């Protein structure tokens, strides 16, 4: 199969250096540090967003969730004290938008790390999920 000049063959992943990787990172989290290290070993220096200091906006969080094919409630860290304080175990939100807003307003509840290349997004748990960003997409 041939491609036009300047065009990547179908199914080929663009060179990591040409994609804009972002990691929503908590430097205190072992899994987050391991995911960042895995990206760097793959030749990627991502933009690092410390989401506890710079919370993810609801519209961006919703986009990331959609790219992962994940419901917002599946991204929740249920063992956090804040989860209990908000009584989310007793009175969970009834809509997607409500969950997204709660997560955006309470970033400590967001499971981490989240890594995106702008098109594809993964939750870096288990760590092997990071490798999915380097698998060719079928045309």
Image (spheres, rainbow, N blue to C red):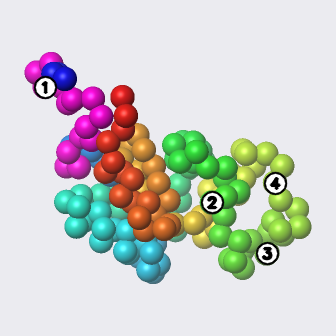
For marks 4 and 1 on the same chain, the one whose residue lies earlier in the sequence = 1
Real-space CA distance between mark 2 and mark 3, rounded to the nearest whole angstrom: 18 Å
Is residue 90 rendered to the left or right of residue 78? Answer: right
Q: CA distance from mark 4 to mark 3?
A: 14 Å
Left/right placement of residue 132 relative to residue 38 reads: right
- Name the residue tied to disc 2: 75
Task: Tell me, for residue 19, which label it has, or none.
Answer: none
Foreground mark, 2 or 4, reads 2
Q: Are marks 2 and 4 in contact (CB under 8 Å)?
A: no
Task: Identify the residue under disc 4.
Answer: 93
Which x, y percent locates residue 105?
65, 59
Magenta stretch: dominant secondary structure: loop
First reached walking from the N terminus: tag 4 or tag 3? 3
Sequence order check: which comes first, mark 2 or mark 4?
2
The residue carrying mark 1 is: 6
Q: Relative to 80, is 137 above or below?
A: above
Answer few, some or many: residues within 10 Å of disc 4's Cα (few below 14, many 20 plus, some between 14 and 19): some
Residue 12, placed above or below residue 86: above
What are the residue bounds of the magenta stretch?
Answer: 4-17
């Amino acid at each position: 199969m041939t491609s036009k000049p300047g065009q990547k063959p179908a199914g080929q992943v663009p060179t990591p250096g040409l994609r804009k990787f972002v990691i929503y990172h908590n430097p205190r989290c072992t899994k987050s540090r391991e995911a960042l290290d895995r990206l760097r070993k793959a030749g990627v220096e991502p933009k690092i967003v410390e989401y506890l200091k710079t919370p993810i906006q609801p519209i961006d969080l919703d986009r990331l969730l959609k790219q992962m094919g994940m419901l917002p409630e599946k991204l929740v860290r249920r063992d956090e004290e804040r989860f209990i304080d908000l009584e989310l175990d007793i009175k969970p939100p009834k809509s997607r938008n409500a969950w997204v807003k709660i997560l955006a307003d309470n970033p400590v509840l967001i499971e981490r790390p989240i890594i995106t290349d702008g098109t594809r997004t993964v939750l870096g748990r288990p760590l092997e999920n990071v490798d999915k960003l380097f698998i060719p997409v079928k045309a």
